Image (spheres, rainbow, N blue to C red):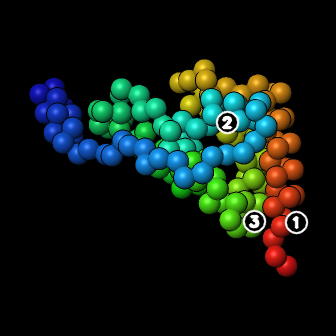
Amino acid sequence: MAIVAAALMAIQAIRTPVRNSGATGELQAPPDVQAALRRACYQCHSQETNWPWYVQFAPLSWFVHGRVSAARRRLDFSAWRDYLYDPGTAARKLGAIDQMMHSGAMPPWYYRLLSARARITPAERAAIETWAIEGRAAALKAEPQ
């Protein structure tokens, strides 16, 4: 038991950065879509993460930081303006949002268990899908041929 306690104390020295770097471009979406995305998605997919207290302790900090970092690499709503500079990138991001909403893959099941804020109603899911489909179509039209 003492060895386990010593190991848990020792791994606390291995810190992961829990920070937000700031937004570079605000997402433009209808108010209902914006509200649902902010409530259910921004926690992992933005630079506005509200880091919970338990991320100060390893190994939970490693897991949470890893999940948020991976989520931000895939889609970062704080960098939305950057995606819009390239219509192909915007179209891919919006297509992925539609696919994830339609399949129910997002938010992940474990996050929905941990946070009631992450639960998306069927009406919110439909609104996000419609916004993503329409935005993808517009981005594809804007893409140079």
Between the residue at mark 1 and the residue at mark 3, the CA separation in whole angstroms equals 8 Å
Q: Residue at x 62, y 29 (%)?
A: 39
Numbered marks: total: 3
Image vertical order of residue 87 relative to residue 33, above or below: below
Is disc 2 in contact with disc 1, using a CB cutoff of under 8 Å?
no
- The kind of residue on which mark 2 rests is Leu
Q: Residue at x 63, y 46 (%)?
A: 26
Is disc 2 in contact with disc 3, using a CB cutoff of under 8 Å?
no
Relative side of 112 to 101, left or right: left
Circle 1 crowding by C-alpha within 10 Å: few under 14, some 14–19, many from 20: few
- Name which quarter of the figure residue 15 lies in: top left
Q: Which residue is mark 3?
A: 87
Between the residue at mark 2 and the residue at mark 3, the CA separation in whole angstroms equals 21 Å
The image shows residue 43 at horizontal and vertical percentages of 54, 36
Q: Upstream in the sequence, badge 2 or badge 3? A: 2
Element under label 3? helix
Outermost residue on the bottom side: it is 145
Relative side of 24 to 98, left or right: left
Image vertical order of residue 43 relative to residue 71, above or below: above
Q: Upstream in the sequence, badge 1 or badge 3? A: 3
Circle 3 crowding by C-alpha within 10 Å: few under 14, some 14–19, many from 20: some
Image vertical order of residue 73 relative to residue 107, above or below: below
The image shows residue 116 at horizontal and vertical percentages of 60, 20
Quarter of the image that includes the N terminus? top left
Q: Is residue 85 visible?
A: yes
- The kind of residue on which mark 1 rests is Lys
Quarter of the image that includes the C terminus? bottom right
Residue 37 circle label: 2
Q: Which residue is mark 1?
A: 141
